[in-house]
Image: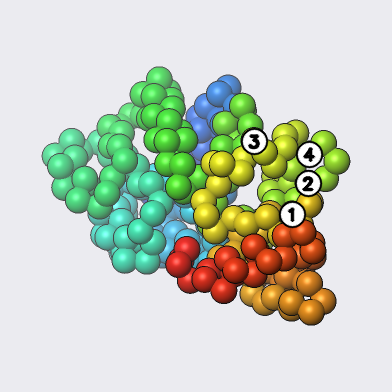
Amino acid sequence: MLNFVICDDNINLLDRLEKMLETIFSKNNYDASVVFKSDNADDILNYIDNNIADVLMLDINLKSNRSGLELAEEIRKRKKNPYIIFTTGHLEYAMVAYRYKTFDYLPKPIVYDRLEDTITRLFEDVNELSKTYIKIDTKNTIVDESEVQYIKRDGMKLVFHTSTRDYDTYSSFNKFQEKLPPSYVRCHKSYIANVNQIKDVEPVSGTITFSDGNTCCIGPRYKKEFMEVFKNYGDFK
């Protein structure tokens, strides 16, 4: 899921933009949500320091201790990967805004069709980044591959487990194994482990402990190959 964060000094516009985005997500079956909004730049920084923010929509002309451009500069010092979309009624800022790895620039007043076009292109861009995101079904459900601890087979379903939530899809390991990065290794008939999310391995008991405290077993059939990969797991980081 893509987490959207919005910052605008006009509360009414914040609410309107959130409603427009949620409508676009629902209409297009995008796995996304507005997880936080504020009219204060410092609140935004505090939020992204402690939470996942994939897309930030920032008003340039904030009536705050920081402008939207200054906020973006500070965000880029802390987070390199989130998409940034600027909104403003002052077109002269457009070229300056692109210094901060800006995905798009939306002039105010924000028009629904223009916003939907931007969000559509953003999801197209995300889906092309096979090394960053995993598309798990036909409904545009995407998962950041670095956040997945393990993939578990549960009957006819696969469960992509992250530290914040689980994603279910009716599929098989065979469909995904060729698409997964090399840090994803089969360790059991019912598990594929993300080696970069492993906290500890106990070879004698055959137990893997992941960074969020969850565990799974190592199957005898997969133990040799898994341990070889795990010993060299630093190559994947």
Residue 110 as seen in the image, left or right of residue 67: right
Q: Which mark is residue 191?
A: 1
Residue 169 as seen in the image, left or right of residue 104: right
The Cα–Cα distance between marks 3 and 2, rounded to whole angstroms, is 12 Å
Q: Secondary structure at mark 1?
A: strand
Q: Secondary structure at mark 4?
A: strand
Residue 57's spot in the image, x, y percent?
A: 39, 44
Neighbor class of circle 3 (other Cα within 10 Å; few <14, some 14-19, many 20+) is few
- For badge 1, the amino acid type reads Tyr
- Whether residue 33 is visible here, answered yes or no, is no
Residue 53 as seen in the image, left or right of residue 166: left
Q: Is residue 182 above or below residue 137?
A: below
Mark 3 highlights which residue? 175
Instruction: Out of 186 and 15, give the one closest to the viewer.
Output: 186
Q: Secondary structure at mark 3?
A: helix
- For badge 2, the amino acid type reads Arg
- Identify the residue shown where x is 63% and y is 32%: 137
Instruction: Out of 157 and 213, give the one closest to the viewer.
Output: 157
* Residue contact between numbered discs 4 and 3, judged by CB atoms under 8 Å: no
The Cα–Cα distance between marks 1 and 4, rounded to whole angstroms, is 12 Å
The Cα–Cα distance between marks 2 and 4, rounded to whole angstroms, is 6 Å
* Residue contact between numbered discs 2 and 4, judged by CB atoms under 8 Å: yes
